Image (cartoon, rainbow, N blue to C red):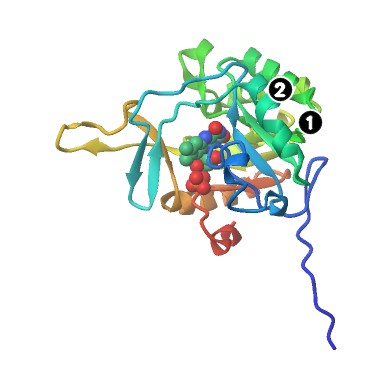
Amino acid sequence: MAKKKTLNTKVSIGRLKLKNPVMTAAGTFGYGEEYSKFLNLNNLGAIVVKGLSLLPKQGNPPTRIVETPAGMLNAIGLQNIGIENFIKEKLPFLRQFNTPVIVNFFGDSIKEYAKAAERLSRVSGIQALEMNISCPNRQAGWSIFGTDPKVTSKVVKTVRNATDRTLIVKLSPNVTDISLMARVAEDAGADAVSLINTITGMAIDIRTRKPKLANITGGLSGPAVRPVAVRMVWECSKAVNIPIIGMGGIISAEDALEF
Ligand SMILES: Cc1cc2nc3c(=O)[nH]c(=O)nc-3n(C[C@H](O)[C@H](O)[C@H](O)COP(=O)(O)O)c2cc1C
């Protein structure tokens, strides 16, 4: 009888070894526990948790979510419970599983990114860090870190010096040339890049003639963005030698295989 072939699904990102390359997208899976009734978290390659900052953040006022054709716009405003509460209240649950935990994090200054990375690196049970650079920089008039190559280089280098954990840089798609940003992240010491984050969009309520989101603009995600995500992953794959974690609009195994 022919021997049944098993597929080797193992992948490595820096020093991090995963049993398979399937992981959650930050912010779409809470802190893991919320979804543990729906799937066995041991089956995932990694659990990526909602983006954390040094201090808790309330996020934006409502309306924060709007449905769009084949997708959604969100302007949650990076609401989160803060790093210390995550370590105390959420991480113990995740430690029961045989699945690496990747913490997505951000800061509103380069110093805050470094402090957050340093704090997270002192905690056992966090195997890798994913830095979200699609957020506003207080010291530069709230412009987005990840849309300026010089700022991206500086913030990634600073975080690289602050952590010995596997470092993933999550790229913003709201740029002209994403392959340049991937190269900048690689040169600054990233072990991997992940993409895409949401694409900035806007929706209008034609009855009130006002934006549907209180924040006016929001981030577009869901199946509508998948062709853009696949194109950007392809562009980055030609530009860097580090692993690329692809995401954007994946709702089936077939969608994931496109990447
Ligand atoms: C409600 C919501 C919250 C998100 N929060 C974060 C976050 O905290 N950090 C981050 O890097 N990306 C965040 N993202 C972006 C997702 O991780 C992902 O990059 C994007 O939504 C595209 O994937 P999708 O189409 O599969 O949702 C968020 C997305 C959504 C929809």
Q: Give percent across and percent down for residue 172.
A: 53, 35
User: Residue shown at 70%/45% (left/top)?
Assistant: 46
Extreme-front residue of the structure: 37
Dots 1 and 2: beta carbons under 8 Å?
Answer: yes
The residue nearer to you, when weighing 62 against 170, is: 62
Q: Which residue is label 1 attached to?
A: 165
User: Residue shown at 56%/64% (left/top)?
Assistant: 254
- Secondary element at image label 1: loop
Q: Is residue 96 visible?
A: yes
Q: Residues within 10 Å of mark 2 (few under 14, many from 20)?
A: many
Identity, as a three-letter code, of the amino acid under mark 2: Ala
| Mark 1 to mark 2 CA distance (whole Å) | 9 Å
Extreme-left residue of the structure: 207
Q: Is residue 173 visible?
A: no
Q: Which residue is label 2 attached to?
A: 117
Question: In which quadrant of the rendered image does the C terminus lie?
Answer: bottom right
